[in-house]
């Protein structure tokens, strides 16, 4: 089969481009350490979330030094807790599940973004910085009221977090 | 001499019965295009907040479902079956084996799509207890009316029969022509259909084993991750199913229109084989952000996806080289000067070239989507529809419209009503899409979600970059309006063309490739080998993820409810549903009859 010289050059260029793209993603994974939402958590009965330690009372909990876990339930048409309050400059692991249909969980203007599938728990860990208010929206169509489904993420100063979280209660 | 006489015959002259099938298929496609465009303009104005008076925000999702089903499934597939019928018959130079089979698959596809269409459109009418506001991805546990799933299944079975029809015709040809290479167009059709059989098997399984029985109340629940994964098993190759007819046109028609010839027949075959092999084991790249699927499977899917760039990049080379050859044949010179010698006044040529250009842009945004961890930034934002309005919405749709200006005269003997309007129409599409798609990509980077009636929220504002949210909304609305006008011009031009008298002497010939099929290794034509490898790759990519999903969540899911969007929550019992369901089936059958009659009459009118 005859392949033109220019075409061979093009072919080499194309393969290099592909390797470059794969390389950039691999770098993102091992360098900055961007991990994918995956199957790290076990399945859960979406019809019985009130029997689950984490999701019976959606909340933010301290799990380590400067490491917090936010247990979030998405539903038609909102998120719990709302707002999600976390302290500044900390590591936050979101565990998000749905009690009805498939939803999305997107912290607007950031790359914190995941599908939320009933029966599954999505886990993603982020670093939060200075105090700021972020919007949260559902980015997967979930029914007639999809467009009103929104929430808030409040990154607050340490002291304010302690106050709101006093007695293990979240807002 | 005999060659010259031969060349004066159009497809309509040589194969009148097949020409009628092609016409009916294309008209089915354009009916879907018209409906899709109407919903498109409503959504553009609603979503951007320019005009929300026509439908409520709840009905927006009915409209969005209709837009997706009519354009992504109906328009594309009906055009494909028409074009492929033309391509097989033309390149084999023999009629189909049995035209009754052909009309059977046409009727199945038209009937199936009518059923699905009815179930969707009924969502606009409150008094009918039927709707299917599940969008064209129909993710469970949102549940559509059973008619929606039934129609889809019938439609897919129709497309399977169509493939069988073309395979049979090829086998008959092979007996008559032992030892000959498969003609290029037929090769493209057959490889595409093998891919389609593999891909659509998953969605057929999902619909028939899970979704349809579930919507009928025969099973209580489904595993949402499983049905979603089966959908995307089908959902990525389906984009190549849309794209392959456009590629067929770029490879086999565009070079001739440009006054040249295809650069290389063997490489065209290699490209189609690569698509057959790589289109399917990549679907998990739509699920990068899904819980319940291990990161390793996502990485494998990404690697396959990136290699899928290869056949498209090869196509870019071949198409440009073939067009350049045509320009030089027409007297073009210089490094870029040859571009001036191309037939830019021909709407078929200009439309396909602009479509190709847009596809390159779509390819770049696609690389971002394909990057596993970069995907976090844009997943389910309006960036994604921005991307696929460049690919299926322009590379495919604009190529189909442009090709119609060339193909329609060949299957009717009627010259196009106005080539000037045609030229204006394809350029208008390009401009409209450039505006709309660009603004959608930009909004996506701000985090604006896709698939929503009202993208503005009460609790927060979007960050500002590349222009603010509002300003980009205006761009989207203007672009969408231009696209709608372009569709109106296209349909109007076509209707007026149908009123033209038949003439003779408009036959166009397709010139063979510079480097012909004899340069291609024989093994390329061994479809069994490629089908075998394709299946093996799919098994490798999907066996473990599917086993893991079923192992974790079970076939029927880890305790997930049912959320029908087609009945009042109060009316839950199956019995109460069975009656309207039966009635809608009767209605659908009546409509199917009407549709088939219509198709027959179109044949008479056209």
Image: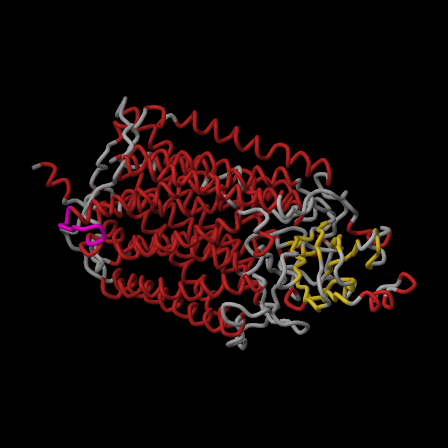
Residue at the farthest right position: A167
Q: Is residue B4 left or right of residue B319?
A: left
The magenta-colored residue range is: B329-337
Q: Quadrant of the N terminus of chain A?
A: top left
The part of the image, by quadrant, that contains residue B153 is top right
Horizontal and vertical percent for residue B414?
Answer: 21, 56
Main SS, magenta region, reads loop
The part of the image, by quadrant, that contains residue B389 is bottom left
Horizontal and vertical percent for residue B400?
Answer: 34, 53
- Front in this rendered view, residue B284 or A20: A20
- Front in this rendered view, residue B521 or B597: B521
Horizontal and vertical percent for residue B35?
Answer: 44, 62
- Front in this rendered view, residue A59 or B55: A59
Residue lying at 15% horizontally and 42% vertically, measured from the top left:
B7
The part of the image, by quadrant, that contains residue B47 is bottom right
Q: Quadrant of the C terminus of chain A?
A: bottom right
Residue lying at 66% horizontally and 63% vertically, measured from the top left:
A137
Residue at the farthest left position: B1
């Amino acid at each position: 089969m005859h392949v033109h010289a220019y075409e061979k050059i093009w072919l080499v260029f194309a393969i290099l481009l592909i390797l470059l793209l794969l390389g950039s993603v691999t770098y993102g994974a091992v360098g900055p350490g961007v991990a994918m939402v995956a199957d790290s958590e076990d399945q859960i009965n979406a019809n019985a979330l009130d029997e689950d330690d984490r999701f019976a009372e959606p909340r933010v909990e301290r799990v380590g030094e400067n490491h917090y876990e936010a247990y979030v339930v998405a539903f038609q048409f909102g998120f719990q807790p709302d707002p999600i309050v976390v302290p500044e400059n900390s590591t936050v692991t979101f565990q998000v599940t749905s009690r009805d249909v498939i939803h999305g969980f997107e912290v607007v203007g950031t790359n914190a973004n995941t599908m939320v599938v009933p029966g599954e728990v999505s886990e993603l860990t982020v670093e939060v910085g200075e105090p700021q208010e972020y919007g949260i929206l559902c980015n997967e169509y979930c029914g007639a009221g999809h467009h009103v489904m929104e929430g808030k993420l409040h990154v607050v100063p340490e002291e304010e977090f302690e106050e709101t979280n006093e007695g293990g209660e979240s807002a | 001499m005999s060659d010259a006489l031969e060349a004066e015959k159009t497809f309509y002259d040589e194969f009148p019965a097949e020409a009628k099938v092609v016409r009916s298929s294309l008209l089915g496609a354009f009916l879907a295009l018209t409906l899709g465009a109407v919903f498109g303009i409503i959504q553009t104005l609603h979503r951007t907040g320019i005009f929300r008076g026509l439908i409520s925000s709840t009905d927006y999702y009915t409209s969005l479902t209709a837009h997706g089903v009519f354009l992504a499934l109906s328009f594309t597939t009906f055009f494909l079956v028409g074009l492929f019928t033309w391509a097989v018959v033309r390149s084999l130079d023999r009629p189909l084996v049995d035209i009754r089979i052909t009309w059977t698959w046409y009727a199945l596809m038209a009937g199936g799509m009518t059923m699905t269409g009815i179930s969707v459109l009924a969502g606009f009418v409150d008094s009918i207890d039927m709707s299917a506001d599940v969008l064209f991805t129909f993710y469970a546990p949102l549940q559509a009316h059973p008619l929606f799933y039934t129609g889809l299944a019938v439609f897919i079975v129709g497309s399977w029969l169509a493939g069988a029809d073309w395979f049979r015709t090829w086998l008959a040809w092979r007996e008559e022509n032992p030892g000959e290479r498969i003609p290029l167009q037929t090769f493209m059709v057959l490889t595409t259909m093998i891919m389609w059989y593999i891909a659509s098997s998953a969605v057929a399984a999902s619909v028939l084993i899970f979704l349809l029985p579930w919507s009928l109340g025969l099973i209580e629940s489904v595993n949402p991750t499983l049905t979603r994964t089966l959908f995307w098993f089908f959902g990525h190759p389906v984009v190549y199913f849309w794209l392959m007819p456009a590629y067929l046109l770029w490879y086999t028609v565009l070079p001739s229109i440009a006054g040249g010839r295809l650069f290389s027949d063997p490489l065209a075959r290699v490209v189609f084989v690569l698509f057959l092999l790589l289109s399917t084991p990549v679907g998990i790249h739509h699920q990068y952000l899904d819980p319940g699927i291990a990161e390793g499977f996502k990485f494998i899917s990404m690697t396959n996806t990136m290699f899928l760039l290869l056949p498209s990049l090869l196509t870019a080379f071949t198409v440009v080289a073939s067009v350049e050859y045509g320009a030089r044949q027409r007297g073009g010179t210089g490094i870029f000067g040859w571009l001036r010698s191309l037939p830019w006044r021909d709407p078929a040529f200009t439309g396909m070239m602009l479509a190709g250009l847009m596809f390159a842009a779509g390819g770049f945004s696609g690389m971002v989507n394909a990057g596993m961890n970069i995907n976090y930034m844009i997943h389910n934002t309006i960036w994604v529809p921005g991307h696929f309005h460049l690919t299926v919405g322009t590379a495919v749709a604009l190529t189909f419209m442009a090709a119609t200006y060339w193909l329609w005269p060949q299957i009717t003997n009627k010259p196009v009503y106005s080539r000037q309007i045609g030229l204006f129409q394809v350029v208008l599409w390009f401009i409209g899409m450039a505006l709309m798609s660009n603004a959608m990509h930009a909004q996506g980077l701000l985090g604006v979600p896709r698939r929503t009636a009202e993208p503005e929220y009460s609790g927060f504002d979007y960050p500002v970059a590349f222009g603010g949210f509002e300003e980009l909304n205006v761009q989207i609305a203007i672009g969408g309006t231009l696209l709608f006008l372009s569709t109106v011009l296209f349909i109007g031009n076509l209707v007026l063309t149908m009123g033209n008298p038949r003439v003779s002497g408009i036959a166009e010939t397709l010139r063979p490739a510079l480097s012909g099929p004899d340069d291609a290794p024989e093994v390329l034509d061994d479809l069994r080998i490629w089908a075998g490898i394709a299946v093996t790759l799919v098994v490798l990519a999907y066996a473990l993820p599917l086993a893991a999903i079923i192992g974790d969540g079970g076939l029927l899911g880890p305790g997930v409810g049912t959320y029908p969007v087609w009945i009042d929550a109060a009316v839950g019992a199956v019995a109460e549903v069975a009656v309207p369901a039966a009635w809608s089936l009767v209605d659908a059958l009546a409509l199917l009859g009407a549709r088939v009659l219509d198709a027959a009459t179109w044949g008479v009118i056209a």
